[in-house]
Image (spheres, helix red, strand yellow):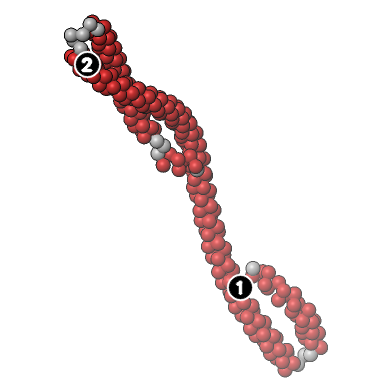
Amino acid sequence: MLCTLTCPLTSKYWPFLTVLHVSINHQEQEISSRSEVEQLHQKQNLLLADRAKEKKQYEDELAAASMRHKEFESIVKELKGDLITAEAREKYSQRELNKVLEVRSTVTEHLKDENYRLRLILREKSNELREALDKLRRYNQLVEAVEKEILTIQRLVDDANLIIGQKEEKLKQLQARVDYVTSDDNSSRLLERARTLQEQLEASRKSEVAKNVTIANLEQELERIKSDNSCLEEQLTSISIDPDLRWSLSI
């Protein structure tokens, strides 16, 4: 740096020095008096003083330039350190980002599998619910049919009871007549008629008993169907879909 700074100084004053040197030689040859030599010496001293002053100025500038160079080197060093730190942070951030992406991919695959499994469960539960509803519908139809049959039989029983009551009333009337006509020649015929009516009455009573047994059996069957219906409703309640399951499938 010193050579670079002093070379322009030398090249700048070189013509002047050359001229001065030639002039001094020429004056030394031509001027023989001591006073002239002293004057020339004074001029040379002045020139040397100027050169020393300029040299001092250039040295100060060189020192200032060297100081600025050191400051720039310090700044460059700090920038390099910051760059290294930034690169390290970037690499760390990239690694963390890769980890996050891997975790995201794993979670996404897990959610896809879980969603597929839940869809299968929902489909299975839906099929079970559909079958249970069909079974409940058939049971309800059967209950309605049994209830209609019971109502029909009940009407028949009521009609039979009415007929039996009417026949009993007629039997009482006939029995009263028999009591009045026991001494008559037609008593045997009346007794036979009474016996026939009595047999018809017994047959009607047996028919009523059979119908009552049929009604009792139908009522037991109806109770059993209602019990099965209650069990089926409990199964339907247990098959109900969880709201959290529905929310996961909607995602």
- The foreground one among 75 and 100 is 100
* N-term-proximal mark, 2 vs 1: 1
> Which dot marks residue 177?
2
Q: Amino acid at mark 1?
A: Ala
How far apart are the two marked residues, 2 and 1, measured between alpha carbons?
A: 160 Å
Q: Quadrant of residue 121?
A: top left
> Which dot marks residue 65?
1
Q: Residues within 10 Å of mark 2 (few under 14, many from 20)?
A: few
Residue 175 visible from this viewpoint:
no
135 to 9, vertically: above or below: above
Q: Amino acid at mark 2?
A: Arg
Q: Residue furthest front?
A: 184
Question: Which circle, 2 or 1, is nearer the viewer?
Answer: 2
- The foreground one among 107 and 151 is 151
Quarter of the figure that contains the N terminus? bottom right
Across and down, in percent, residue 107 comes to: 48, 40
58 to 167, vertically: above or below: below
- The foreground one among 14 and 177 is 177
Across and down, in percent, residue 217 comes to: 30, 19
Helix, strand or loop at label 2? It is helix
> Does 163 sit left or right of 121 as displayed?
left
The residue under the point 36% across, 34% down is 237
